[in-house]
Image (spheres, helix red, strand yellow):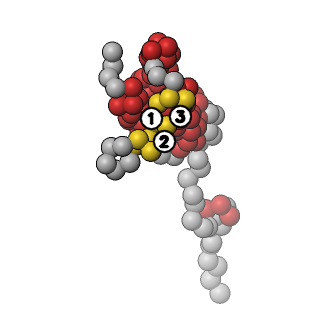
Amino acid sequence: MSSTQVNLLPPETLGPVSPELPAQTESAFDLLLHDHVLQILLAAALVVNLTLFGYLAIRFEVLPDNLPLHFDVTGLPDRIEAKTGIFGLAIIGLIVFVVNVVLGVLAHRRQPAAALLLAFSALLIQILMWFAAINIIGGIV
């Protein structure tokens, strides 16, 4: 009888080994602090929204008491409200901004591109709100 020597391996080397994931010590907010493109997009969206609020506040006194806020396909107004309703555009823009920031923070760790897309779309929505406000008021000046 011959004796065969068997090398016994530790149990952790017997099966497929998954690489250990590094400890994730940075929060999603910390990761955002290092993404300068995302910061610029979010800052631009916020500035555009705040300037819309300011512009509407400056123009508020000269607006007629009743404003057409929605138009049908032919261009005729189908929703007329008090002039305070014009602030609804800036408020909707702010809500979109906040929702996109929250979703972007949540998505940034796994999908930084999705966070950038959300920030860019927030900026685009703010610009569209400006166009809507200018169209309703009848011009910039």
Residue that label 2 marks: 79
Question: Where is residue 25, by image quadrant?
Answer: top right
In the rendered image, the quadrant that contains the C terminus is: top left
**Residue sitting nearer the eye, 1 or 100:** 100
- Whether 67 is drawn above or below 13: the answer is above
113 relative to 15, above or below: above
Seen as rendered, the residue at the extreme right is 11
Q: Which residue: 56% across, 39% down?
A: 99
Q: Amino acid at mark 2?
A: Arg
- Name the residue tied to disc 3: 81
- Where disc 1 sits, the SS reads strand
| Residue 7 image position (x, y, % from top left) | 62, 67
Residue visible at 59% across and 49% down in the picture: 20
Which of disc 1 and disc 2 is earlier in sequence? 1
Q: Residue 111, relative to residue 41: is it above or below?
A: below
Q: Residue 54, position in %: x, y?
A: 48, 15
In this view, the residue in front, 38 or 120, is 120
Q: Residue at x 46, y 22 (%)?
A: 64
Q: In the rendered image, which residue does mark 1 sit on?
A: 68
